Amino acid sequence: MKRIALFFDRPYVDAHFCFTELARNLAERNFQVDLYHIPNPYNLSPGFLNDEIRVKQFPISKTQKLDFFLKALFTDKLKYDAIIGTPINGAVMGARIAKREKIPFFYLADEIFDPLTKYHSIANWEKAKRLDIAANNKAAASIALGEERYKYQKKVNHLPDSLPYFVIPNSPSGEVKKLQSSYFRDIFEIKDSKPIVLFIGTLGWNLAKLIYERTKEYRDKEYHLIFHGRTKGLMGDGNAHPFIKVSGQPLPSTLLNYAVSSADLGLVLYDKTIPQEQNNGWTGGKIGTYFKNGLPVIAGNLEQFKVFEEKNIGTFWDAKVEIDLIIKNTLNKITTLQKNIPDFYAEHYQYETFFDRFYSFLLKKIL
């Protein structure tokens, strides 16, 4: 059995399908997977119903790094056939070990760090970014979450045209399926049959904050509005809001589809005035998650989101029109919108379709 290491120097691995689905799909194709991440008390550690996936501590401290490299040098416990790493530390460490072991390294750009931006949270920023760029350039291939996003990554990391890359969307595996679920109705004791409009995220998003403030005057509507996030401190005081129901209970990735299926409509809230949101909006994990579970969307206000309205799977929101009117208009045609989701999802977001192209390349590199 082939072995692969995933160096994800992130605390929020379980909250993003770009991480968990990669591990699951590799394990389902007869890889033994060691997934390294950074545990912390605010995020759930990833959990898998597969014995071939082992979750481990990403080495951060000097002691942890020394222990890791000694095991890598003098034992067979950390011998791999390939490594995948995220920027910056996961990529630099992965590229270093791959070079020593003469195995392929793959660069997974879940985030793109522009060298012109000063990231104060990253120690020795200039040196770290130089090493990150070198790691990406030495990779057997890059894994990107979207085409436009890769163009940006190619620019900031000075990547040659000859470097192979694969787009694998940040979405769940499987075809579109709305599960029989009453998750949000149960936790909020919703007794009526009004539809549920769901936003996955926090008040760190401008348009989410806008809706949160504007709906404070709302009372009884033809729908329920729920904000669900994994970071309680960024969700506002749900008890104080007279209309929005706030769910701050983190969910494991294995239950996220079940929870989302209990809603009827999804909110995608990115702001075109924020460069990072403009670059990354299309690749947001919430989009694929909504569509996977059969939810049409209201998407604002990036220009590329107009395609959802053109394909009749959602509504574009310019963030100027009252959100209540947009929600009502969308709910009035929700049955038609739902019918059009599977074809669009299969073409743009279904995980396996994109993963299989990368997997074929991976096998050629290690066999």
Image (cartoon, rainbow, N blue to C red):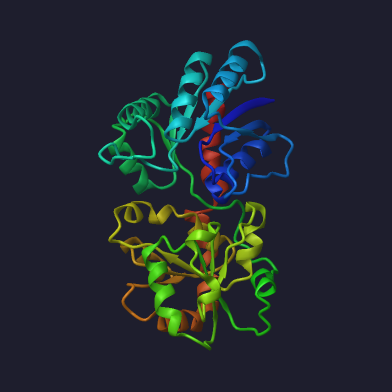
Residue 29 % position (x, y): 66, 36
Q: Is residue 114 visible?
A: yes
- Residue 211 sits in quarter: bottom left
Q: Is residue 197 visible?
A: no
- Residue 329 sits in quarter: bottom left
State the residue lying farthest toward the top: 74
Of residues 345 and 248, which is closer to you in this image?
248
Q: Residue at x 52, y 80 (%)?
A: 243
236 over 55 or under it: above or below: below
Residue 96 % position (x, y): 46, 20
State the residue lying farthest toward the left: 116
Residue 300 % position (x, y): 37, 67
Of residues 366 and 231, which is closer to you in this image?
231
Q: Residue at x 46, y 84 (%)?
A: 328
Of residues 185 and 64, which is closer to you in this image?
64
- Name the quadrant of the C terminus: top right
91 over 44 or under it: above or below: above
260 over 188 or under it: above or below: above
Q: How many dots with numbers?
A: 0
- Residue 122 sits in quarter: top left
Q: Residue at x 41, y 60 (%)?
A: 204
